[in-house]
Amino acid sequence: MIVGTELFKCLEQVHGKDYHHFLARKLVAVVGNVREANMGITPELADDIAKKVDIIINSAANTTFDERYDIAMDVNTMGPFRLMSFARRFSKLKLFLHVSTAYVNGRRQGVVLEKPFSLGDTITKELGYSDSSGLRNTVLDIEAEIKLAFCSRHNSNDAASFSQEMKDLGIERARLHGWQDTYVFTKAMGEMVLDSMRGEIPVVTIRPSIIEGTWSEPIPGRLSGFPADGDGVVDVVPADMVVNATLAAVAKHAQALGAAPEMHIYHVGSSTAKPLIWRDMFTFFFQHFTRYPFNLASGQPIKVAPMRLFGSIEQFDSNVERDVLLWGTGETLSPRARMLFSKYAEKITHLARMYQPYGFYGCRFDIANTEALFAEMSVEEKAQFHFDVRSIEWKDYFTNVHIPGFLKHVMKGRGGSDPFSTVKVFDGRVTQPTVIVNGGSLWSTLERQRLHRSGLPPGAGLPPDSSKSEEEEEEEEGEQQPDPMEGVDLEEEDVAGPDEEPEPVVGFAM
């Protein structure tokens, strides 16, 4: 149950033994589905909700970059359409808040203002392609895109190839119109649909950038990370700041009595107000794991190497081929292991291409509306619902909040898997010097080594906790650790590699 997770510990501490009674008075859980009319709710319950609810917050989304076009369209574009259709029945509705992403700005360049999309907008036109390219007069017809996605689904007879065809179609359509992938393209169309349907309903759209671990609430460091180009800017924002900005926007616009209904856009990001350089972020990880390294089963610390960054996808591919494929051709490797290395190389080069537009992103997000929203708050409100990104010190955030919080809350199995069971070709015991991005989770470079078969020791990569007693430490050491080898049948000789020291590469793993 969500309310029993650590994210709600602060609230539980406030209410103590009355916690569950408090929640029962405040929450009514309803199972719904944005892929169905009226959210798939029974008519009686739908009528009851329509009479009582005055604020809608929609954060439902499919966030897979290269999702099947029909699925992404159904959730990210048709989902908002269905929810707004339902919202029109609400007699007391004060506000419809939609959570999108700052990356709906697609391949725009420079500083991008907080402006809504209108039906049919296409970024291709903004980019000023020449007439000879055939793209200048490209028109985005959302109804036609919906028909294309769903007709393609119905016309397919080959189930084996259908899924990949639909993924390719989504990427093709996105890039035709100026977006980098299916996810942001279908999210942008969802915004357009809401703007065209809203009528007299006030709508607020929150566009966060890359959401990272919480800055301070409810527990420091809860969440994850991303890939990169050396001197480029990575737009990162702590998750709790996104939540606080959302709550502030609700408080402001739900009480705006008599105001003309508008579409309000808020970018929640850091690239203009507190830019973070990719190279600096990697350096923070390197420094942390140099100071607080992981250990081998023998207790020997694992050395880390500075991250090498690549200026093009071609450079990245050549390094993957050398450092993964060539390493996987050693005489000590079985044919099965070589095949796994080959598949691994294919996967990371594919994912690198998915992430490439974000690692070399040429757009920064203006946050004038968001900063104005924060400025309007009282001193007490600013302290309680803080979202001023200018206050973040990135080195302190990554080294003292994000990395320790990530290792503590994710690598211990609370919401994620450890890096060595994520890339199973490495058998849980062998790592290539690489940054592994686990669904956006950034890991430091690790020297290729055999790691303890049962996973990482408690507290690996974390600063020593002087507050623990010897009894507590002994108890932790005695705890049964999850086995990352479960379900993996690579034999011992499958993971042996050459003796030479490999150079670090940047790798990606979902």
Image (cartoon, helix red, strand yellow):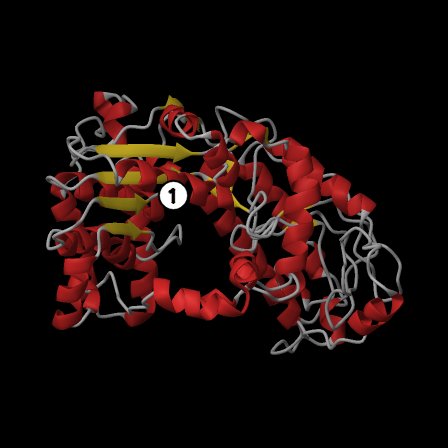
- The image quarter in which residue 120 lies: top left
Query: Looking at the image, which residue is at 76% across and 48% down?
Result: 502
Percent from the top left, x then y, of residue 281?
Answer: 64, 36
Task: Determine if residue 157 is in view.
Answer: yes
Q: Seen in the image, is 214 located left or right of residue 116?
A: right
Query: Looking at the image, which residue is at 22% across and 56% down?
Result: 53
Percent from the top left, x then y, of residue 54?
Answer: 22, 51
Percent from the top left, x then y, of residue 331?
Answer: 76, 65
Does dot 1 land on a helix, a strand or a loop? helix
Mark 1 crowdedness (10 Å alpha carbons): few <14, some 14-19, many ≥20 = few
Task: Determine if residue 156 is in view.
Answer: no
Q: Amino acid at mark 1?
A: Leu
Q: Seen in the image, is 261 located left or right of residue 251?
A: left
Q: Seen in the image, is 444 located left or right of residue 171?
A: right
Q: Seen in the image, is 419 located left or right of residue 473?
A: left
The answer to whether 346 is drawn above or below residue 426 in the figure is above
Percent from the top left, x then y, of residue 243?
Answer: 44, 45
Query: Looking at the image, which residue is at 55% across and 65% down?
Result: 16
| Number of disc labels | 1
- The image quarter in which residue 283 lies: top right
- The image quarter in which residue 50 lies: bottom left
Query: Dot 1 corresponds to which residue?
Result: 247
